[in-house]
Amino acid sequence: MPKEKTLDDLFYDTLKDIYYAEKQILRALPKMARAAQSEELKAGFTKHKEQTEGHVDRLQQVFELIGKRAQGKTCEAIQGIIAEGEEIIEEFKGSPAIDAGLISSAQAVEHYEMARYGTLKTWAQTLGKKDVATLLDQTLQEEADTDKTLSKLATTAANQKAAA
């Protein structure tokens, strides 16, 4: 009979999921930066790519702390969110609505990541992995800050430009 799955197993499985997701996001961000019209949004995507590289490094530290090899597990959710973003790029490229569309796609990514990191942080605390929870919380805060920045860009410029 197979061993009963534990919260520790679920934690590791979800960690592999977000690791894969971060790697996919790293590949998508340069495309989003190229498609953006506003210099501020281009710069935001470029800055977030650098931040995401830090998220991957932090996840590698987490894998090390739990004594597991850093590896990803295909995350269909992030693949779908990124595919939607690519559709927006194709359908709205060059239009005044492109930046609003890119921001909405980026926020879908951020919200997915915030959900994952929030859950992982809580599980790490429950499992007594305080150092792991601290690392995950750092990334969670950065994702939340990026989300706020995107909201600000949307409401101060992109949405109005798209509606004009």
Image (cartoon, rainbow, N blue to C red):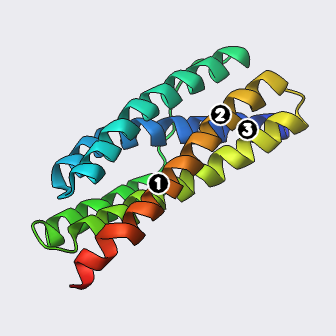
Q: Which residue is identified by label 3? A: 11
Residue 157 in percent (x, y) is at 31, 68
**Which marked residue is nearer to the observer: mark 1 or mark 2?**
1
Name the kind of residue labelled 1 in the image: Thr
Left or right: residue 134 versus residue 152 is right
The number of callouts visible is 3
The one of 21 and 32 positioned closer to us in this rendering: 32
Left or right: residue 23 versus residue 37 is right
Residue 26 in percent (x, y) is at 35, 37
The one of 1 and 49 positioned closer to us in this rendering: 49
Query: Quarter holding the C terminus?
Result: bottom left
Badge 1 density bin: few <14, some 14–19, many ≥20, Cα 10 Å: some
Numbered circle sitting on residue 138: 2
Is residue 100 visible in the rendered image? The answer is yes
Residue at x 13%, y 66% (from the top left corner):
93
Task: Specify which label sits upstream in the sequence, 1 or 2.
Answer: 2
Q: Is residue 69 above or below residue 12?
A: above
Query: Quarter holding the N terminus?
Result: top right
**Which marked residue is nearer to the observer: mark 2 or mark 3?**
2
Numbered circle sitting on residue 149: 1
Badge 3 density bin: few <14, some 14–19, many ≥20, Cα 10 Å: some
Residue at x 36%, y 37% (from the top left corner):
47
Residue at x 26%, y 84% (from the top left corner):
163
Task: Specify which label sits upstream in the sequence, 2 or 3.
Answer: 3
Is residue 5 visible in the rendered image? The answer is no
User: How many angstroms separate mark 2 from mark 3 (CA)?
Assistant: 17 Å
Name the kind of residue labelled 3 in the image: Phe
Name the kind of residue labelled 2 in the image: Gln
Q: Is residue 1 above or below residue 134?
A: below
